[in-house]
Amino acid sequence: MSEKEIILTKQGLAKLEEELELLKTVRRKEVAERIKQAIEFGDISENSEYEDAKNEQAFIEGRIMALEKTLRNSRLIEDGEIQTDVVSLGSRVLLLDADSGKEVAFTIVASAESNPMEFKISDESPVGKAIKGKPINSQVEVTVPRGRITYVIKSIEK
């Protein structure tokens, strides 16, 4: 089975590479030191510090494997691929909530780099799916956990 290609922006790629480097060079060493110290405390069968450090180590190793897989299957999106006539991966989109009149801007990214707190939404999210491929002034209805929202696409930029 072939792996799904993950398309990343320059910023998204850099962020994932930075996280991977931190995990491999700093966090691995920190948790190994914690395990070593916990073993020095004696009986590891009843040592919560040892158990906690081993769980953290498993989490770090799992995250390293996930990041390496993502990076192995990733492709950098080129500026020329980002469209401004319709919403595409990499587009910065200004949406108008037709009901409230509030505007919100998002960048459409692959799920690997989505972060709603940074206004980066996945092209696979309900809003991302609804607006992808749509031109400026399109009206789209999106079903979200709190109900249906009608958005109007006000602008599309790189």
Image: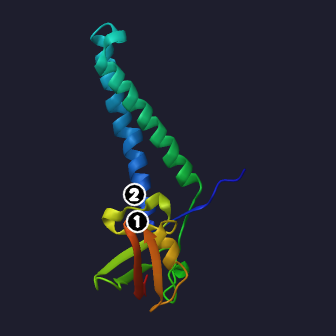
Image coordinates of residue 64 in percent, x first then y, are 47, 42
Image coordinates of residue 152 in percent, x first then y, are 41, 87
Image coordinates of residue 79 in percent, x first then y, are 50, 78
Q: In which quarter of the image is the C terminus?
A: bottom left
Using the image, determine if residue 71 lies above or below residue 154.
Answer: above
Identify the amino acid type marked 1: Gln
Instruction: Tell whether label 2 touches label 1 (CB within 8 Å).
Output: yes
Q: Residues within 10 Å of mark 2 (few under 14, many from 20)?
A: few
Q: State the residue in front, 17 or 88.
A: 88
Please identify the residue farthest to the front as the structure is shown.
Answer: 147
Q: State the residue in front, 103 or 70.
A: 103
CA separation, marks 1 and 2?
Answer: 6 Å
Q: Name the residue under label 1.
A: 11
Residue 1, numbered circle:
none
Q: How crowded is mark 1: few (under 14 residues within 10 Å), some or many (20 or more)?
A: few
Please identify the residue farthest to the bottom as the structure is shown.
Answer: 137
Q: State the residue in front, 59 or 12.
A: 59
Residue at point 52%, 84% (across, down)? 83
Residue at point 50%, 81% (across, down)? 87
- The local secondary structure at tag 2 comes to helix
Q: State the residue in front, 37 or 44.
A: 44
Q: Mark 2 points at which residue?
A: 15
Residue at point 35%, 84% (across, down)? 96
Using the image, determine if residue 63 lies above or below residue 54.
Answer: below
Residue at point 54%, 52% (across, down)? 70
Give the side of residue 104 with respect to residue 10, left or right: left
Identify the amino acid type marked 2: Lys
Image coordinates of residue 19 in percent, x first then y, are 39, 49
- The local secondary structure at tag 1 comes to helix
